[in-house]
Image: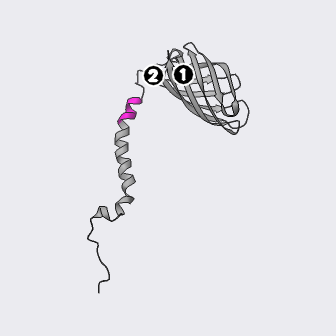
């Protein structure tokens, strides 16, 4: 009588290989993604300024505004001189236009201040074609965290 029987099936048919599959896939994806991310980094000589943002940009953002879930999309037109005009539509029928001021540091980090107290920080591509942003201060003292992206659609 045999107390222990060894399987004659190959390892990949035993089902045990599934436990290591996520690690193998993650390793391959890391190798594939790393070169792509390296290409997205600004060159050491990249210099940005307010002129980097010029033209019409479309955007979408999502998060929490004044302690409530919120989503918004719209268009911003940057003048390349530190001024921006925003047209937007958001959750609950909120819509409007407003003007704001923005700055851009040489390392392509932007800041904007909107009239109702919102402040925005952004990371801009060196050619100004797109950027990501986070808003961490809203019009009231209630929690606000919104994030999104913008892409230039017209010069």
The residue drawn where x is 36% and y is 49% is 25
Image position, residue 22 (x, y; %): 39, 53
Magenta residues span 35-47
For label 2, the SS is loop
Q: Which residue is mark 1?
A: 57
For label 1, the SS is strand
In this orientation, which residue lies closer to the viewer: 23 or 151?
A: 151
The answer to whether 105 appears left or right of 70 in the picture is left
The answer to whether 116 appears left or right of 44 in the picture is right
Q: Residue 146 falls in which quadrant of the image?
A: top right
43 within the magenta span: yes
Q: Which residue is mark 2?
A: 126
In this orientation, which residue lies closer to the viewer: 60 or 99?
A: 60
Contact between marks 2 and 1 (CB within 8 A): the answer is no
The residue drawn where x is 54% and y is 21% is 57
The answer to whether 94 appears left or right of 84 in the picture is right
Image position, residue 32 (x, y; %): 35, 40
């Amino acid at each position: 009588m045999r107390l222990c029987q060894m399987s004659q099936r190959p390892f990949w048919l035993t089902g045990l290989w599934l436990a290591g599959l996520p690690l193998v896939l993650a390793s391959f994806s890391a190798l594939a993604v790393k070169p792509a991310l390296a290409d997205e980094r600004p060159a050491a000589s990249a210099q940005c300024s307010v002129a980097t943002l010029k033209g019409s940009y479309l955007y979408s953002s999502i998060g929490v505004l004044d302690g409530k879930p919120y989503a918004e999309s719209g268009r911003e037109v940057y003048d390349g001189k530190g001024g921006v005009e925003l047209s937007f539509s958001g959750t609950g029928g909120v819509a409007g236009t407003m003007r704001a001021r923005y700055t851009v540091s040489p390392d392509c980090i932007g800041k904007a201040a909107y009239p109702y107290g919102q402040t925005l920080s952004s990371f801009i591509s060196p050619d100004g074609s797109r950027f990501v942003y986070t808003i961490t201060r809203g019009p009231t003292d209630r929690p606000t965290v919104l994030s999104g992206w913008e892409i230039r659609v017209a010069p």
